[in-house]
Amino acid sequence: MMTRRNLLAAALIAPLLLLVLVSFIVPLGATLYRAVEDAEVPSILPQTTALLKQWDGKDLPSEQVYHTLIHELREAQEQQKAGPVLNRLNFEETGLRSLLLQGLRASQQFNGSTKQHLIALNPRWADPHVWDLIKRSTGPWTPLYFLRSVDLKLGPGGVVVPTADEEAVFIKLFIRTFEISVVVTLICAVLAYPIAYTLSILPQVWTNIGIMLVLIPFWTSILVRTTAWFIILQREGPINALLVSLKLVDQPVTMIFTRFAVYLAMVHVLLPFAILPLYSVMRGIKPDYMRAAASLGAPGWRRFLRIYLPLSMPGVAAGALMVFMLSVGFYITPALVGGSGDQMISYFIAFFTNTSVNWGIAAALAALLMGMTGILVAIAWLLVPGFRSGGVRV
Amino acid sequence: MSDPIVVFDKITKSYDGINTVVHELDLSIERGEFVTLLGPSGSGKTTTLMMLAGFEEPSGGTITLDGRLLNHVPAHQRGIGVVFQNYALFPHMTVAGNLSFPLEMQGIGRSERDQRIKAALDMVKLGPLGERRPAELSGGQQQRVALARALVFQPKLVLMDEPLGALDKQLREHMQMEIKHIHEQLGVTVVYVTHDQSEALTMSDRVAVFNQGRIQQLASPSTLYEEPANAFVASFIGENNRLVGTVVARDDRYCQLRLEDGTQIEARLAGDLAIGSKAVLSLRPERVRVGPGEPDTNAFTARIEELIYFGDHTKLRLSLGGSSGFMARTDFKDGLRDLQRGASVPVSWSRDCGRALPFSEQE
């Protein structure tokens, strides 16, 4: 009897587990796997990979290694498979691609020792570090993508060193992403609080109208709302037209492609996510609490600070958490209304996925973003009162 | 004894300007008194309490506390303790934090606060529970905390809005006694709102019976019960038989009523009733003797329609004087044990127990 019930319970839960598995665990695992996988060089240059495994890493490799590398690369190029390898090696250190392409082009005329020809062609071929870089790309795992996501790389001898300043973009990008998210979250919380409070004390008819006014934009596509801001804020847009016609400004004000536009559009898109949980929490705060506080001698501001604010804190926390989580992953809004200095991490994840086709770094950035967001939320969970219940009052 | 602490003078309250919830209410509460506002829901008793607490403003009239006009004094400056129906304990604070709140608002220093919190918790027998959260307490314990919180800042006046409504019967009766003892011990003035008449009778010095925004009667519990001023009070306080008839004869103290089926009943006059006017006989079921006994002024034979067993007594629904809803109550002292539905029994009562009240059309 018990077993049948257990089976039934398992069968009822199974679709949910499957959904979590397919839609969450598997993509997450695949992303993490891509962030550390190193398959391009071993799969396309298998013999070079095998030979380099035996190389001691101190002296220059033998003629056989030079020859095999160029031979395998040429074969790959003829089959149009050299791209990923060259990309991978160039990501290890910028300049490796041109060094290899130069060698490939010249190798048509080589007769005799490939090693000597290459060294004659470019003295870098006499630098064991170049071979060190190639050997490092022979897999099967690499820390490269995670290191680069935090502006680090492996220097000579496998020591972790900071990347060159012109390549060190990712930490700045993470800081910018969290900065924009925190500012948007704070603005949303400050704006949502009085709105939700007003909604919670209005007569029911007005509350319903107010909630509709919050929900209608909420139901509208983010893309549509962002595009609307794009139109409103542009140089020839209605705001500038108004300002100029009122002679408040001589020249149209630059609003589009600024941080201001990003904040404005993101706050607009995300505000309902802050208002709705706050409203539901505030609606549940019985007026008797405030009456009790008054009867116990507390004037209005002390009632607010000591009673109402703490009781509404779970709503603030739930709303802020929602807004922050969504902000961190924002892509389309900054991409449309922000300038080049306002793009967030998702923009670069999309760029590495679609444009430069470097899934390793895209995966590493995505994994790090998730990890950092998790840590920040955990800190908030420990520090912010009311956060733990996540909007549910106990 | 005339040292009123609270005086309501022609207090009127209307939320919409058309319907009055409280109508020209006059009420004077003595210092140290336990006054209960009793009435059905919507009778205006809670609104009256809310106006005294400062949560509602009167539409007309004045309220004074210790001679000070209260009408425009905000709630937090009134210094009146309030116990709410659902306790309204602050859920994010401990029990001690809840008790500390009013003391902090008065700017009382830490050591005195701790001392007074401890004393208040001991008073309600919750000494060791100061560090608990309200949600971790039982309903009865929460009720005690609410009581302690309303008393800890030593208000002259404490208001209680159906404070025992959420408790089960046994606990409620126990808490009634405890509140009564605390009231006697502290000498604080209490205004208590309830719709439970037995609670009002057991706890109060005086009871104000509310109906339709007016005080129907303000009197001690025994006066209310024995000498209800009108038919509403008579039926609201305790059980009551009401028989409608016409006055056919009267002297200074008694009158003869003839019911519609011709039955004649002698009763005490409880209002000025002219011969020929319509009147209501009000008679408590426990005043009716069931079974043979010394002949009383009013003696009849009635048919038993229904028997309701209560353990310590039995209620009988009888057919008498053209009504089939005449209630009588017997504890079998009169010896009748084998009562049967449909049987006839002798019933009787003294003419001093039945009260003849003027008949009013609205009933």
Image (cartoon, rainbow, N blue to C red):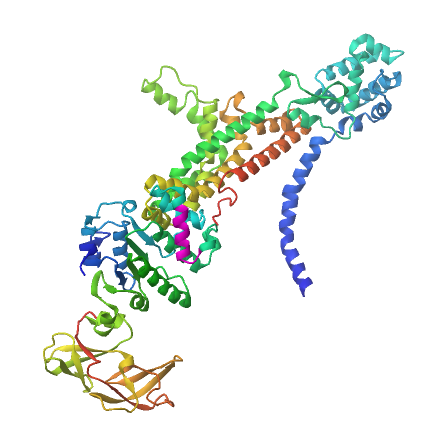
> Horizontal placement of B225 versus A290: left or right?
left
Placement of B282 over or under B67, stated as above or below: below
- Whether residue B115 appears in magenta in the rendering, the answer is yes
Q: Residue furthest right?
A: A112
Q: Residue at x 36, y 51 (%)?
A: B152
**Where does the image place residue B277, in percent across and percent down from the top left?**
12, 78
- Which corner quadrant holds the N terminus of chain B? bottom left
Give the dominant element type of the magenta stretch: helix, strand or loop: helix
Where is B132 relative to B299, above or below? above
Who is closer to the viewer here, A179 or B204?
Answer: B204
Q: Quadrant of the C terminus of chain B?
A: bottom left
In this rendering, would A223 be left or right of B302? right
- Given residues B289 and B323, the one toward you in this image is B289
From the viewer's side, name the closer residue of B306 and A252: B306
Observer able to see residue A283 = no
Residue B94 % position (x, y): 45, 48
Q: Is residue B261 visible?
A: yes
Residue in the image at 27% along x and 71% along y:
B237
Q: Position of residue B270 (x, y in %)?
A: 16, 75
Query: At x 62% / y 20%, what residue is drawn?
Result: A168
Q: How many numbered dots are placed on residues in this image?
A: 0
Magenta part of the protein: which range?
A: B113-126
Q: Is residue A151 left or right of residue A251?
A: right
**Residue at (26% x, 76% y) in the render:** B240
Q: Is residue B146 shown left or right of residue A100?
A: left
Where is B343 relative to B176, above or below?
A: below
Q: Is residue A234 magenta?
A: no
Residue A180 lies, in percent from the top left, at: 51, 28
- In this view, the residue in front, A284 or A19, is A284
